[in-house]
Amino acid sequence: MKNKVLKYLIIILILSILFFILFNIRKEDVIKESTTTEKIVSKTNINIQKNFIEEEQSTTNEQTVEKEYIETEFKGYKVSAKLYIPKINLETYVLEQYSKQALLTSVTKFYGGEPNKIGNFCIAGHNYGTPNMFQNLKNLNINDEILLIDTNGNKIKYIIYDIYKVLPNQTQCLSQQTNGQVELTLITCTLDSEKRIIIKARKE
């Protein structure tokens, strides 16, 4: 009888030990799973917060485009934009319609779409000694800065990437194939009027 009782006690003890071991193993697995889940959730939250911050910064950047409103007319001519070139101290209105008479008043849009839009906005001006003309374009260099303000007040910075001369019948500089970029072309005559000085700039 005592042997049977002892036998049962041993069996109960062994079962208790096995149950304790299995319970602890399962507990460790649950803890590991919980920790892994917490890490995944935490990483997901971090990514969501990062994306939100990036989107917010992008929106903020778009909203903080510098605005500077300009006159819509200059000496009776409709204005398309205003041009600043700090290096040569040039500040001039770009008239919307190209004509011989308009060119005597200021520089004008010569070809292309709208200012500060995708494409190649081309501006022509005489090489005269008046302050609002293009007589000092010859003093510009690659990497110099040009600012263009459209009638919506958007002030966009352009950087010169090419300068060259062409004959009057060479019009490749007017091309609108810009690979989706916003470009600016300034055109004036050389002093002898036999060639054209071309300044090519691209939105920064």
Image (cartoon, rainbow, N blue to C red):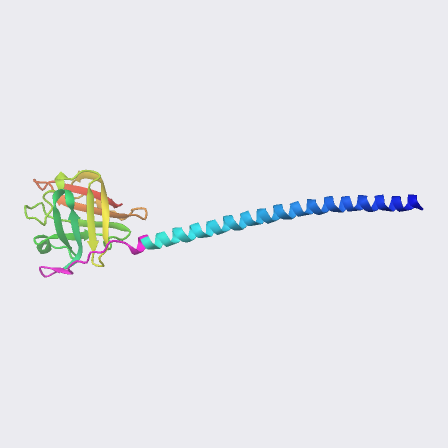
Q: Position of residue 13 (x, y in %)?
A: 81, 45
Residue 65: in magenta span: yes
* Residue in the image at 69% along x and 45% along y: 24
Q: Residue furthest front?
A: 2
Residue 10: x %, y % from top left? 84, 43
Task: Give the overall secondary structure of the magenta segment.
Answer: loop
In the image, is residue 138 part of the stretch drawn in magenta? no
Residue 170 visible (yes or no): no
Q: Nearer the viewer, residue 43 or 82?
A: 43
**Residue at the (19%, 39%) spot, across then down:** 163
Q: What x and y, as percent, mark residue 141?
A: 18, 38
Q: Which residues are magenta?
A: 61-77
Q: Residue furthest right?
A: 1
- Closer to the camera, 49 or 194? 49
- Residue 195 vertical position relative to residue 47 in the rendered view, above or below: above
Whether residue 90 is visible to the viewer of this picture, yes or no, is yes
